[in-house]
Amino acid sequence: MAMKIRLARGGSKKRPFYRIVAADSRMPRDGRFIEKLGTYNPLLPKDSEERVKMDMERVQHWLDQGAQPTDRIARMLEAAGVREKADRSNPKKGAPGKKAVERAEEKAAKAAEAAEAPADAE
């Protein structure tokens, strides 16, 4: 059985609240889970201790059993110091989009024309 440690959404519309659960990866997001391991309330400030609560003993138990944390849970575990920080690489994130590249090329072309014009006048 492929186990995941993941978030299960609760709360009302526009007021999210998540349970941190150990669940079979084939089950739906908010469906059946094996054990509740904690809670996550994204509406609280980032420095609040109530924002993320986890039973670290049980989380460690499930990790030892081979459960895979989702990306968001892995980040929470890194912040708590349970897991080592993983290197993430997204080289395209900082790259400008198509329109920005086109605007930069147009600006460079205009600057080159402006630089050539005074040289021809002299």
Image (tube, rainbow, N blue to C red):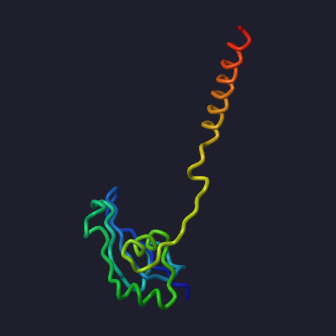
Which image quarter: residue 41? bottom left
55 or 25: nearer the viewer: 55
- In front here: 120 or 93? 120
Q: In the drawing, does residue 20 fall left or right of residue 99?
A: left
Residue 42 in the image: above or below residue 64: above
Q: Is residue 61 left or right of residue 105?
A: left
Q: Residue at x 60, y 47 (%)?
A: 95
The image shows residue 72, relative to residue 13, as above or below, that is: below
The quadrant in which the C terminus is found is top right
- List x then y, in percent, for residue 78: 42, 73
Please state the horizontal and vertical placement of residue 54, each as a whole percent of the image: 33, 79
Left or right: where 121 falls relative to 97: right
Which quadrant would residue 53 be assigned to in this image? bottom left
Which of 106 and 54 lies nearest the eye of the viewer? 106
Which residue is pictured at 35% across the width and 84% down the height?
56
Q: Residue at 54% across / 68% down in the picture?
A: 87
**Residue 5 position in % (x across, y down):** 45, 79
